[in-house]
């Protein structure tokens, strides 16, 4: 097991930050300081690579003559408005835009950007989360449609599965021929559906604080060994369950220290069994092993590259490594990539690599730099006995209202 060394700040988090990168358009120079987590002298395991917030970080810049010939696209079509869910495969990043009401498609392999689900029978009303199956089918959770909307490998609309009433679907996972739909309405349950027909096979869980029960759950996934993992937001914990809903372990409590949660949100599991949980209150991603033991964290509050601003979801992918190799330290052995969504700020889709340096390798202090930590804010610390705040203590409240998945205020 390995642990991080924490440099204390207002929320108990310390980070280092990469400088000299303006997005996905250019690789860092060899002498640029880099961002690693945890910071030395601990052994680095996560490197921040780059970020994107729309077409400008994916597509080659147009000349003024090309713009004159082709016309200027609407800025709204070239930028992600308010992201939430994300899924990645072979250099293509699919982002649920809850304000633009579409899927944004960032193709780092072909250097293209476009949107889908904006019109026709596959028109999305409030896309929240997305997963990809091994064949390339996309399953999109839409709580306004109250459906799981399916797009094919060619990105064309295929069908939509109704989630039985009352329903407020917020996330979906897949295992073999079963879909696991997380419903955070008053029933607080997992609806298990047939992947091909949408037929409801069974339900799991229910409202409450006992193991296997949930209070406004936020996210779920299936790990490589076939277990379910649930981000149980208003119980301030995560759970590992069998596919029949029996609790294997329950971890977490209200708090702003490692192993506890202020607002647990997106949860995903890597191919090595490491569990990643985005926390919208502390604005970090915590990492646990398959037994629920805390390992380390990365990210931190702020708007600098590598920091996170109200993170919502994590996606994990190994197939996209070739398209981000230019950002990875030449001696860092990257095993897979981590894509973390920030709902606000200048850097919405943040790309990290998980891996390690060779045994005995040492980074010099000149190769990294630290991000100044914010001053301690009133109310930071133990939150036992009270609800964690719904806004980040480090950002203006008017910009940082925490949006629970499926919040549909202002939508028909």
Image (tube, rainbow, N blue to C red):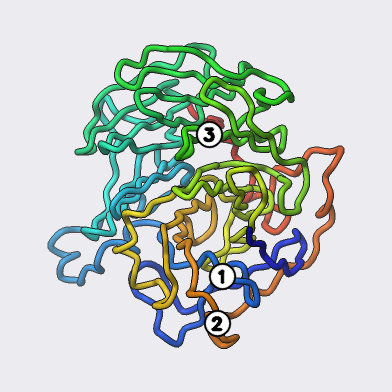
CB within 8 Å, label 2 to label 3 = no
In the rendered image of this protein, does residue 355 appear above or below residue 77?
Answer: below
Horizontal and vertical percent position of residue 231: 61, 36
Gap between marks 3 and 1 measured at Cα:
28 Å
Q: Quick one: label 2 or label 3, which is nearer the N terminus?
A: 3
Gap between marks 2 and 1 measured at Cα:
9 Å
Gap between marks 2 and 3 measured at Cα:
36 Å
- How crowded pointer 3 is (Cα within 10 Å; few <14, some 14-19, many 20+) is rated as many
Number of the label disc, if any, that sits on residue 44: 1
Number of the label disc, if any, that sits on residue 220: 3
The reply, left or right, for residue 5 in relation to residue 114 is right
Is any atom of residue 247 visible in this view?
A: yes
Residue, far front: 359
Horizontal and vertical percent position of residue 30: 41, 85
Q: Quick one: label 3 or label 1, which is nearer the N terminus?
A: 1
**SS under mark 2:** loop
Residue 103 figure quarter: top left
CB within 8 Å, label 2 to label 1 = yes
Horizontal and vertical percent position of residue 118: 30, 36
In the rendered image of this protein, does residue 127 appear above or below residue 208?
Answer: below
**SS under mark 1:** loop
Horizontal and vertical percent position of residue 389: 75, 44
The reply, left or right, for residue 58 in relation to residue 289 is left
**SS under mark 3:** strand
Residue 39 figure quarter: bottom right
Which residue position is annotated with label 2? 363
In the rendered image of this protein, does residue 214 appear above or below residue 132?
Answer: above
Q: Residue at image x 84%, y 38%?
A: 386
């Amino acid at each position: 097991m390995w642990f991080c060394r924490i440099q204390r700040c207002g929320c108990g988090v310390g980070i280092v930050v990469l400088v000299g990168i303006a997005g996905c358009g250019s690789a860092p120079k060899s002498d640029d300081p880099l961002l690693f987590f945890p910071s030395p002298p601990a052994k680095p395991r996560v490197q921040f690579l780059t970020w994107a917030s729309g077409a400008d970080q994916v597509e080659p810049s147009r000349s003024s003559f090309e713009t004159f010939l082709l016309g200027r696209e609407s800025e709204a079509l070239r930028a992600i408005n308010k992201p939430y869910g994300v899924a990645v495969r072979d250099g293509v990043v699919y982002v649920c835009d809850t304000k633009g009401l579409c899927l944004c498609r960032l193709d780092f392999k072909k250097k293209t950007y476009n949107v889908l689900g904006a019109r026709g029978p596959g028109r999305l009303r409030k896309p929240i989360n997305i997963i990809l199956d091994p064949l390339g089918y996309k399953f999109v959770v839409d709580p306004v449609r109250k459906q799981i909307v399916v797009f094919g490998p060619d990105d064309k609309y295929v069908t939509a599965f109704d989630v039985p009433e009352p329903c407020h679907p917020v996330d979906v996972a897949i295992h073999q021929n079963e879909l696991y739909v997380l419903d955070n309405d008053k029933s607080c349950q997992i609806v298990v559906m047939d992947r091909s027909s949408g037929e409801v096979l069974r339900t799991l869980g229910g409202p409450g604080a006992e193991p296997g029960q949930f209070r406004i759950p936020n996210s779920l996934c299936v790990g490589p060994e076939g277990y379910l993992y649930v981000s149980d937001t208003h119980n301030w914990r995560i759970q590992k369950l069998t596919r029949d809903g029996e609790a294997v372990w329950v971890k977490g409590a209200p708090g702003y220290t490692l192993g506890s949660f202020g607002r647990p949100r997106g949860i995903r599991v890597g191919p090595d069994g490491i569990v990643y949980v985005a926390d919208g209150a502390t604005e970090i991603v915590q990492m646990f092993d398959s037994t629920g033991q805390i390992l380390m964290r990365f990210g931190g509050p702020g708007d600098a590259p590598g920091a996170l601003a109200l993170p919502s979801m994590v996606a994990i992918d190994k197939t996209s490594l070739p398209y981000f190799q230019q950002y990875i330290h030449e001696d860092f052995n990257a095993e897979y990539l981590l894509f973390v969504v920030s709902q606000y700020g200048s850097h919405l889709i943040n790309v990290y690599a998980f891996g390690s340096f060779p045994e005995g390798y040492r980074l010099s202090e000149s190769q990294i730099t630290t991000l100044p930590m914010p001053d301690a804010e009133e109310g930071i610390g133990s939150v036992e006995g009270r609800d964690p705040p719904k806004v980040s203590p480090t950002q203006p409240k008017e910009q940082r209202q925490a949006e629970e998945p499926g919040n549909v205020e202002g939508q028909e």
